[in-house]
Image: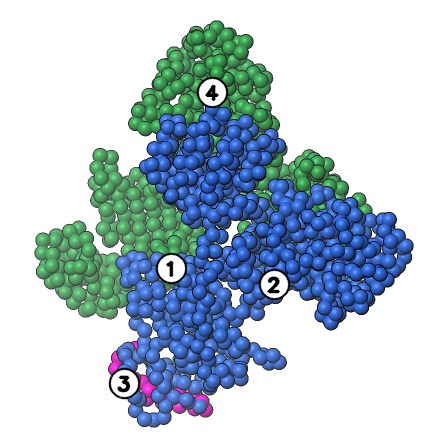
Chain colours: A green, B blue
Amino acid sequence: MSKFQFLLEPRSIAVVGVSDDAARPGSQAVRALMRNGYQGRIFPVNPKYQEFQGLKCYASVQAIDEDVDLVVIGVPAKGVIPVMRECAAKSVPYVTVFSGGFRESGPEGVEREKELLDIARGAGIRVIGPNCLGFASIPSNVYAAFGSITRDPKLEPGNVSLVTQSGGFGYSIALACAEAKIGFRHVVATGNESDIDTVEMIDALIDDPETRCIVAYIEGTRDGRALLRVGRRALAAGKPVLLWKGGVTEQGARAAASHTASMTGSYDFYRALYKQTGIVEIGELHEVVDYLKAFAPGKQPQGNAVAVMGVSGGSAIVFADAGERRGLTLSALTEATQERLAPVVPSIGAIHNPIDLTAGYFSEHNKDKLEVALRAVLDDDQVGSLCVNLATTGPGGSAVAAEVIARVSNHYSKPIVVFSSTPVAANAEALDIFSQARIPVLPSPSRAAHALAVLWAYGRARERIVGAALAEPAAELDTDARAALRAGRALSEMESKAVLSKAGVPVTKDLLVRGDERADLAGLSYPAVVKVVSRDIPHKSEVGGVKVNLASAEAVASAIGQIRESVARLAPAAAIDGMMVSEMVTEGFELIAGVVNDVVFGPVVMVGAGGIYAEILKDVSFRLAPFDERTALEMLDELRCRPIFDGARGGATLDVASAARALAALSRFGWAVRDEVQEIDVNPLFLSSRGVVAADALVVPKARPGRGAA
Amino acid sequence: MSKFQFLLEPRSIAVVGVSDDAARPGSQAVRALMRNGYQGRIFPVNPKYQEFQGLKCYASVQAIDEDVDLVVIGVPAKGVIPVMRECAAKSVPYVTVFSGGFRESGPEGVEREKELLDIARGAGIRVIGPNCLGFASIPSNVYAAFGSITRDPKLEPGNVSLVTQSGGFGYSIALACAEAKIGFRHVVATGNESDIDTVEMIDALIDDPETRCIVAYIEGTRDGRALLRVGRRALAAGKPVLLWKGGVTEQGARAAASHTASMTGSYDFYRALYKQTGIVEIGELHEVVDYLKAFAPGKQPQGNAVAVMGVSGGSAIVFADAGERRGLTLSALTEATQERLAPVVPSIGAIHNPIDLTAGYFSEHNKDKLEVALRAVLDDDQVGSLCVNLATTGPGGSAVAAEVIARVSNHYSKPIVVFSSTPVAANAEALDIFSQARIPVLPSPSRAAHALAVLWAYGRARERIVGAALAEPAAELDTDARAALRAGRALSEMESKAVLSKAGVPVTKDLLVRGDERADLAGLSYPAVVKVVSRDIPHKSEVGGVKVNLASAEAVASAIGQIRESVARLAPAAAIDGMMVSEMVTEGFELIAGVVNDVVFGPVVMVGAGGIYAEILKDVSFRLAPFDERTALEMLDELRCRPIFDGARGGATLDVASAARALAALSRFGWAVRDEVQEIDVNPLFLSSRGVVAADALVVPKARPGRGAA
């Protein structure tokens, strides 16, 4: 760790706001530092005291006659700003502010937080908080914190770091892990995140050699792009990030808004980000525990096929049910494997997968047989990982099994997980052996399946994302289009299609017919469509400005005449730029695609089933732009209508690759024009066996500062 | 309890198959009976011993000179049949067979199981097993079982009964409950269910006054209808049934088939059954624990609106996220409530929902304030239930909170659940108070939300189902149609629509034009369709046998002529019954409906979005027939395309009530003809603002014994 080393492991800490009231946050921090044997210097600050807890007490930060790495501020909100000024004067590098009464508490608090940040920026101070429970670095006994983390049970040191916007709920996560004997490195509650936010902290923790896994609870982030970058960096570094996003439903988001005043951001976009970073989504406390256990040995499943072995048929079924829903399969076993199993599995058992060892198998008597069975299965190339169901095996049998499994596990790089129902209190011997060997023990077969599924998905994400080619640079906007967008004008259908076409998204052929001369329609295929082009006519159909299904050049010419006449009658004041003649798409499945330039995540690409189904059935997929064709294929694979592309119900096989190319191109374009473009709608986008083509498009400019959206 | 009283609480038990080998199942049972102080008579049976464990040992069942309520058979498979004969000779009423080697083990085992059952049926013996771990009745210390349940930890007596096809996995469920201090009444492992199955056992347990909740793990059932009846009876009796169905995925089902040789049945149909019975679906071990805790106080949420109160904003957000996904909402609080809260909640907290009491609130100091706050919220008519988030509050604060919550809870019929992260080992005082007051304490906010959601859904199911009008009797099949189906002939489109119309499903108007005379088309609306009617022509279009979009009587007459000519040329040998002239449907949303007569569940009705979407997007809903219109409306509500019916995207509002009437009618018909009909397809079924109408239908007969499907 370098970046935040003297923040998280300060050599000296001043605590402003200590008092004889042991419940005061500052008092809690000093007591925790002392009780836990923090090795640096502690400077309590309160002008009323000479001494606090046997330490010299200072009248102010400036009165401290030594260097201070970290100042902890626990005074009421109104007193924070003066203390910050002292910190600035003393060139303190790091501050954490416990106090509430900032952004979360209304306009006055917003101003106060701004002032705090101004002082910090001006003096180069980095700040955690305000409105936070602070942080602790367990191995070095740093407790710049108050509340639960300063009380029993003390967290054990370990390799998991936790970053949390909500100190309270974050500590619920820590306690759940502690109960499962998971140890911690840094535990940081970021609160209002006026300066250092969760994402920057995760970024720093990636570089901490002692941190192997990072757990985070957030309610929002102001910069989804930073999270994307940091998530990918963590993936490349092989440090799993387990992220719990609170406020993913309408009501959850409402509750979050009143909690940390965070922008919660669209859950769809977070989910896209998880897929693009390998970040593991968390939605329940025990998932954190289970997945940390699963990641601890650092082993990767070799594929999604699992072997299940044990003494309870029901458990194997429950495992299969849960596994299938997360993409696992029960692997076939080769004949060679079954031949090796036959002599060591009772005849009333089963040597196919799931392997039924029969009740009571785990015993001293079967030790050697169990080893043969485990090795046979793990040697099988078709087996990617193994779940052993001890189920309700008693403590004696469990200990025997643990010993054999631990020994065999050492020789294999395939992960093994164990399901045990044996009450923990009675099972110390076995649990200890498993723990030493870093073999995850899960309390249900479904949780065992989920743990393996997460490992497998993480490994796939690494293969897919790390080192994947970055998207190539996109075509630039031409000068006219850029000027129009900068002026806050949406591009017309024809302009929109022209820029998309240049960017690599196939569009239907359009011709602009101006003036009175006979249209030059050479090279156009039929049927065709004619639409009036005018900025003054928002709804073309209402003024008879659209004619479809025109079979020939003559029909087109006649339609142009009819439109001209109708528009002249119904919209006499409209300035007419001309007539757009387009080829009409007569085949293909109707998709919809688009880009939205989200305030948190930047350009995000959407693709979905078109027509009423996009909106009603929400058959859509999202990814943050830019991305490559492989990612675009994954998006298409996620659609429920996907089987149609493969010719379901006797239809033609559609050209999925061309759709993926168009989406990747759209993503590059959306990214390239992110400063000008708020939204791109490609609707409809027809996918046929001959390719993909956009029949209509719209490019909407970003609202400029100081003026409304166009 | 009456039906199985002397099975589950026998006055005397003979155990056949005891031996000096303590691991033998019979030996385990006798030792468990003696160790636990079973009060009845125990008769060990083994001709080799005079005495077993200090008890007189008998040479055979017949050698026992007293009445025997229950014989436990633990001898190897081959020895079971002779023992059964002895039981028959001695008129033993109940037997449980531990031994494997029956249906689950191949053809020889199937024969053996049949013989076992024949003896039992002949002698009026009721049997649990074979291939089972047996059963225990905890309060009366009956242990007709072997394996985990006979070992430590001993289950505590209580009011939960557990029935499980898989003894091993069932006991994992029991251990998870035991760890949460949930006590048991009867624990029954049914194994192969040759005679008594899970459903019959649940049925008997409904009548056991000491059983308040029933938990079941099954891999399949042979009679889904019995489960439906029993589920409804349990609901009416107010005894929640928590059902875990193993083998709900493809791979899970495959594993189940090799485990208990159960017919797993369609998961869709089980889910329909859950909705029609209020049975609570279980898919994870902790759900059993959480929901049993939630049901224990016997309180029902008054609506789906929940108040959340506590010291952790993050927990409230996580609760809201989890609750919304299960149909809960955070209730608004009246002004009166907020006025009552204001003086007792710190000003930096929040008096809207979620109510933020602020960190450290739960303390002796705030005892009276907490009581005021709890009462204010529970008095609010908009609040249906309450979750209190203690989160990481320490043991002292938790105990204070527990005392106040327990006291207040006594005065309210609204359920209260508590989320606590405090380590259990350190929190005995609070947990004890909560336990006495039957207030569920859950270890995560999401689990607290799920528990309340299950309570709410159960209450709704009771309101909806108990006492609901039964579906009225359906129209009978007319004699011709019945004869055709009994002969194994599918009804023609016209016949099918005629019987459905008679049953109350609106169909398009059809006319049959026979012979050469000019069609009498009076009263027909246009456009119309003409199709040739002939049993010899399976694919009418291929012989030019269909003409659509006919605008007038003249066009119809002309089309009839053309079809006649074309068919005469392309299918000269076909016998022509005539021409069917039908009104063509030109408006409405395309649905699909149908009935499948499932071997496990009987007639099940399906409705879904039509066209390609039924198959590809699987936007379908199922219910077991027969059912009422309200149930049909629920089915329609479940469809993802539902917003279209309400005029989404500017469309017309569709006549949903007419669709519900048609589905209810279809369900009554499907039920009435269950002996004759295998399948009914109504496709397409058009729903418009003017009603619903089936444009095509097919009624397929049941395969008769001794012949293939028609």
Q: Which of pointers 3 and 1 lies earlier in the amino acid sequence? A: 3
- Closer to viewer: mark 2 or mark 1: 2
Q: How far apart are labels 2 and 1 at the CA level?
A: 32 Å
- Report in which chain the residue with disc 1 lies: B
Quick check: is B559 in the magenta stretch? yes
- Report in which chain the residue with disc 4 lies: A
**Do residues under tags 3 and 1 come within 8 Å of each other at their CB atoms?**
no
Q: Secondary structure at mark 3?
A: loop
Q: Which of pointers 2 and 1 lies earlier in the amino acid sequence? A: 2
Q: How far apart are labels 3 and 4 at the CA level?
A: 90 Å
Q: Secondary structure at mark 1?
A: loop
- Closer to viewer: mark 2 or mark 3: 2
Q: Mark 1 — residue?
A: B641
Local packing at callout 3 (Cα closer than 10 Å; few below 14, some 14-19, many 20+) is few
Q: Position of residue A574 (x, y in %)?
A: 12, 53
Q: How far apart are labels 2 and 4 at the CA level?
A: 60 Å
Horizontal side, residue B523 vs residue A467: left or right: left
Q: Secondary structure at mark 2?
A: loop
Amino acid on which disc 3 is placed: Ala
Confirm whether residue B551 shows in the render: yes
Residue placed at 43% from the left, 47% from the top?
Answer: B302
Amino acid on which disc 1 is placed: Cys
Quarter in which the C terminus of chain A is drawn: top left
The answer to which image quadrant residue A32 occupies is top right
Q: Mark 2 — residue?
A: B221
- Closer to viewer: mark 3 or mark 1: 3
Quick check: is B305 in the magenta stretch? no
Q: How far apart are labels 4 and 1 at the CA level?
A: 54 Å
Q: Mark 4 — residue?
A: A25
The answer to which image quadrant residue B537 occupies is bottom left
Do callouts 2 and 4 point to residues on the same chain? no
Above or below, comparing residue B228 to residue B443 in the picture: below
